[in-house]
Amino acid sequence: ASLRGLEEKAESIRKRGSGRLRVAAVPSMAIVAVPDAIHVFAQRYPDVDVTLQVADSLTVCQWLATGYADVGIASEIFNGTSVASEVTRKSRGVCIVPSDHRLAKRGGTVTPADLVGERFLSLKSSDVMRKRIDDACQIDGEDKRILAYESHFAAAICRMVACGLGVSVMNQLVAREYASQLAILPFSKRIEFSTYVVYPLNIPMNMLAKSFADAFRESSG
């Protein structure tokens, strides 16, 4: 990855352009917030080439540590990956259900008791938010949901809920992008989803990476 990063820097010099920015982001943010940030960034640096690479949080951190990306957007930070980070946003978890679901018709706040017997769409077991959601949905130490489907991708879960495959608890920032396709309801248990800007440890961000980080904060604020 480090060699490939050097090759890309050399290519940027050969192009004689104003530079290149390599952004790495988790899928949910690559769909929801990063395009808006790129739009803001492009207005300030119209001659800069931007490459968006999408991966899970661990890979995003590894890419930043090895110089394969200039700035990253992650939903989780891992120790030992030689990156620095800062939280740019915290979003509360909400319950998402199909538009014609009984909970959508009832409205109001959804409790774990409301999810008993419901087919539930989960994030993968390796996702840090999966355990928090599972713990929040327990009733007297028991999980009474029907765990039907799971995915690494929050956007895929939103779309499956919209198709009527079940219900879920999701990052509000992601869920609102699908507000026309499903119902979004408050969830009684407080679950916070964090979004991080990631950059190499002990290496100052270059001007383009810093400007993109600023644009991301503006667009996701």
Image: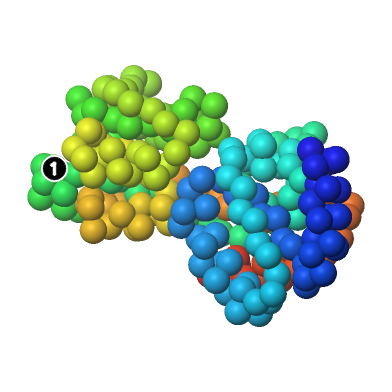
Question: Is disc 1 surrounded by few (<14), some (14 to 19) or many (20+) residues within 10 Å?
Answer: some
Indicate left or right for 177 with 152 as reference: left
Residue 101 position by quadrant: top left
The image position of residue 83, as x and y in percent, is 78, 46
Residue drawn at (42%, 49%) of the image: 171
Q: Nearer the viewer, residue 59 or 11?
A: 11
Q: Amino acid at mark 1?
A: His
Above-or-below relation of 41 to 133: below
Indicate left or right for 207 with 78 as reference: right
Residue drawn at (59%, 40%) of the image: 55
How does the figure colour the protein chain or chains?
Answer: rainbow
Quarter holding the N terminus is top right
Residue drawn at (11%, 46%) of the image: 100
Residue drawn at (89%, 52%) of the image: 202
> Which residue is at the far right?
202
Residue 49 seen: yes
Determine which residue is flagged by label 1.
101
Residue 85 seen: no
The image position of residue 176, as x and y in percent, is 34, 58
Residue 204 position by quadrant: bottom right
The image position of residue 187, as x and y in percent, is 32, 47
Above-or-below relation of 18 to 157: below
Count of marks overlaid on the render: 1
Above-or-below relation of 23 to 83: below
Indicate left or right for 102 with 128 as reference: left
Q: Secondary structure at mark 1?
A: loop
Residue 81 position by quadrant: top right
The image position of residue 123, as x and y in percent, is 43, 33
> Which residue is at the far bottom?
44
